[in-house]
Image (tube, rainbow, N blue to C red):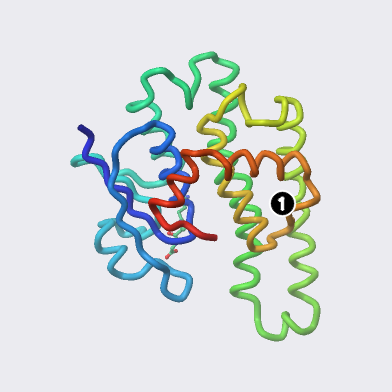
Amino acid sequence: MPDITLYFLQASRSIRIAWLLEELGVAYRVEAWERENNKAPADFKAAAGTALGKAPVLRDGELTILESGAITDYLVENYDPTHRLLPLDTAQRSKVRQWIHAAEGTFMVHCLAITYARWFSSPSSKTNGDLETLEKGLAINVQKDLDWLEEELQANGGDWLVGKDVTAADTMVAFSVQFIFARGLGGQRGRWKGVDRWLENVEGREAYKRAVEKTGHKL
Ligand SMILES: N[C@@H](CCC(=O)N[C@@H](CS)C(=O)NCC(=O)O)C(=O)O
């Protein structure tokens, strides 16, 4: 029996890992925290036991793993004996890896630039139009990311990002897109129809619903 604990911060990337664990059918405990002033509280940082203090953190026995992409790699390498979430086929495998990296290295980088602009711009930039201009410029990258996602979904038949079933590509990228739409970071539901349909698939999936139920995740 694995001895897995997911350190879960509310409204965060942690949902990627809960969903993946549900897809894998692996037993795990959830330790969940609410944010304080948008940040992880001190007791999360103490429990997670790393100076970074960011979620998710996964503990498997004595092993502690950070970074949702690295946790995803670890879980599929160790708990997916049929290679369902990271297929063995080279073309599919490289596509799944592409999306695992894009979830953080492209989608989150681009949309968080807007979040940080909102958080850290001077009060005057919020009234003199500077923040609005900055947001418009930063939104271009987010929209390109969503155009790309739309195109790839269409090329793959529309249901999932790679192949005919859910993979680690979906479990990683979905949160990035839900976050963009929920916070209005350069894109809204309605403009990318294929992306909307894919998110409906994600949100209707039993394993995803179990993850939400178990963790209390709500964006
Ligand atoms: N690249 C990291 C990002 C981790 C991260 O920034 N997590 C955010 C939540 S989504 C966090 O813990 N924020 C709380 C804080 O900064 O105090 C990953 O993919 O796990």
Give the quarter of the image for residue 202.
top right
Q: Position of residue 81 (x, y in %)?
A: 36, 19
Answer left or right for 113 relative to 205.
right
Residue picked out by circle 1: 142
Q: Position of residue 66 (x, y in %)?
A: 36, 47
Taking the spot 78% from the left edge, 60% from the top edge, the residue there is 137
Answer left or right for 193 relative to 77.
right
Answer left or right for 37 relative to 78.
right
Ligand 1 found in image quarter: bottom left
Q: Position of residue 53 (x, y in %)?
A: 35, 60
Q: Is mark 1 within 8 Å of ligand 1?
A: no
Amino acid type indicated by mark 1: Val
Taking the spot 31% from the left edge, 63% from the top edge, the residue there is 44
Helix, strand or loop at mark 1: helix
Taking the spot 78% from the left edge, 45% from the top edge, the residue there is 192
Label 1 crowd (10 A; few <14 / some 14-19 / many >=20):
many
Q: Quadrant of the N terminus?
A: top left
Q: Quadrant of the C terminus?
A: bottom right
Question: As rendered, which of 31 and 124 lies closer to the eye?
Answer: 31
Question: As rendered, which of 76 and 195 lies closer to the eye?
Answer: 195
Above or below 94: residue 137: below
Taking the spot 76% from the left edge, 30% from the top edge, the residue there is 154
Answer left or right for 142 relative to 53.
right
Q: Position of residue 57 (x, y in %)?
A: 34, 50
Give the quarter of the image for residue 62.
top left
